[in-house]
Image (cartoon, coloured by chain):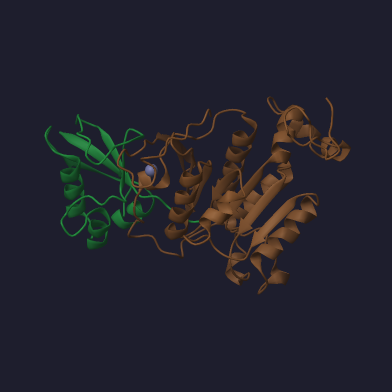
Chain colours: A brown, B green
């Protein structure tokens, strides 16, 4: 294969791997369906992660380890003591300092060649479109439905896939939204559940489990390996170690995605 | 006939149990089933499941044997059927 001077392959536009890439990712390139092409797809990808808490921080860490080229992080505010039971990118010595700055430092310690773009703000109706524009895939890990609905609207408008993942107490849920093809978040619930509260019971191991599964959804979306959770929702109860995969459907009257005609080949 | 209604996530917390069984007939609608469930529970459970007009809230997800049910979808009820009532969660 011929290489351009920017390290891009002339034929497919994906970045080339260098010797360090081949050395670091050697063992995962042995996985069926990955190889050099899959690793180049990962290197080419840019993933937006909404919040770097217990779930999102784990997603970011796993994707940084897997060799995703660019990670965009959005999360407002400084680290608090009560973050430290689950937000594994945060450290005790940085309490009071920026979460996204700390996350970037931790991710670069693992993968110094990762391109990390940070925003010290949470997703909102005002910034969602701009944040999504710079990403090829979105991972939604926000604790407020307002943020999730804003992100959902933006990914539907821009036709970008989103891994929608969440946890509560010992439970987790996960689906992959392909606008125009699968149910969007508003298809499932056009309004926030009345019982939801900003502060919720959480163990780091539950959030981290959901985060690892979400990272695998992203890896599958990027590389085309396996089968994503598009069209279904994985629901897990880690108190009883029970997993179920439920079918979900588009709502034909959904105010967000009913006119969306994007089709994915996933 | 007896059907089973399972609760997940926050609905389970409010219901205080994993599952109840209720007696229905073949013409009972989904909304009537949820109204019957709500009668058995606390005011907080009722207001989570139903709005002030006693209509099923759009934030409630209903699964029939792990398949999402549209709120206006007529149900074919049978003895022993299991519905799950839940909501989306948002913890991150
Ligand atoms: Zn929709």
Residue A150 seen: yes
A88 and A60: which is toward the camera: A60
Estimate the x, y position of residue A25 in percent, counting from the top left. 79, 37
Estimate the x, y position of residue A191 in percent, counting from the top left. 34, 54
Q: Is residue A171 left or right of residue B74?
A: right
Q: In this view, does A92 lie above or below B90?
A: below
A37 and B60: which is toward the camera: A37
Quarter of the image with the N terminus of chain A in it = top right
Estimate the x, y position of residue B62 in percent, counting from the top left. 30, 42
Q: Quadrant of residue A66?
A: top right
Residue at 63% of width from left, 56% of height from top?
A: A73
Q: Is residue B79 above or below residue A171?
A: above
Q: Is residue A29 left or right of residue A157?
A: right
B89 and B71: which is toward the camera: B71
Residue at 31% of width from left, 55% of height from top?
A: B16
Which residue in the rendered view is the most extreme toward the bottom?
Answer: A96
Q: In this view, does A193 lie to the left or right of B38?
A: right
Q: Is residue A44 left or right of residue A83?
A: right
Which residue in the rendered view is the most extreme toward the right?
Answer: A19
Q: In which quarter of the image is residue A122?
A: bottom right
A88 and A141: which is toward the camera: A141
């Amino acid at each position: 294969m011929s290489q351009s001077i920017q390290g891009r392959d002339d034929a497919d536009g994906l970045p080339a791997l260098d010797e360090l890439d081949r050395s670091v990712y050697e063992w995962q390139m042995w996985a069926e369906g990955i190889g050099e092409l899959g690793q180049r797809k990962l290197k080419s990808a840019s993933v937006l992660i909404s919040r770097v808490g217990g779930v999102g921080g784990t997603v970011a860490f796993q994707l940084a380890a897997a060799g995703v080229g660019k990670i965009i992080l959005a999360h407002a505010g400084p680290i608090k003591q009560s973050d430290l039971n689950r937000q594994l990118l945060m450290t005790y010595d940085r309490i009071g300092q920026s979460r996204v700055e700390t996350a970037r430092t931790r991710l670069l310690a693992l993968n110094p060649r990762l391109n990390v773009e940070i925003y010290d703000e949470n997703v909102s109706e005002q910034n969602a479109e701009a944040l999504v524009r710079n990403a090829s895939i979105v991972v939604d890990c926000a604790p407020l439905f307002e943020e999730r609905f804003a992100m959902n609207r933006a990914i539907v408008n821009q036709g970008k896939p989103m891994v929608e993942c969440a946890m509560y107490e010992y439970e987790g849920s996960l689906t992959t939204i392909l606008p125009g093809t699968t149910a969007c978040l508003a298809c499932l619930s056009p309004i926030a559940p009345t019982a939801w509260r900003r502060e919720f019971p959480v163990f780091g191991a539950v959030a981290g489990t959901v985060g690892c599964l979400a990272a695998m959804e992203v890896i599958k979306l990027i590389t085309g390996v396996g089968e994503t959770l598009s069209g279904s929702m994985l629901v897990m109860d880690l108190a009883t170690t029970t997993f179920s995969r439920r079918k979900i459907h588009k709502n034909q009257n959904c105010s967000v995605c009913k006119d969306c005609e994007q089709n994915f080949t996933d | 006939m007896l059907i089973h209604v399972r609760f997940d996530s926050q609905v389970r917390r409010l219901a205080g149990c994993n599952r109840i069984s209720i007696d229905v007939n073949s013409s009972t609608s989904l909304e009537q089933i949820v109204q019957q469930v709500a009668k058995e529970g606390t005011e907080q459970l009722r207001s989570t499941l139903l709005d002030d007009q006693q209509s099923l809230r759009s934030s409630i997800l209903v699964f029939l044997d792990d398949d999402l049910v549209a709120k206006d979808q007529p149900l074919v009820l049978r003895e022993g059927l299991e519905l799950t009532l839940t909501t989306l969660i948002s913890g991150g």
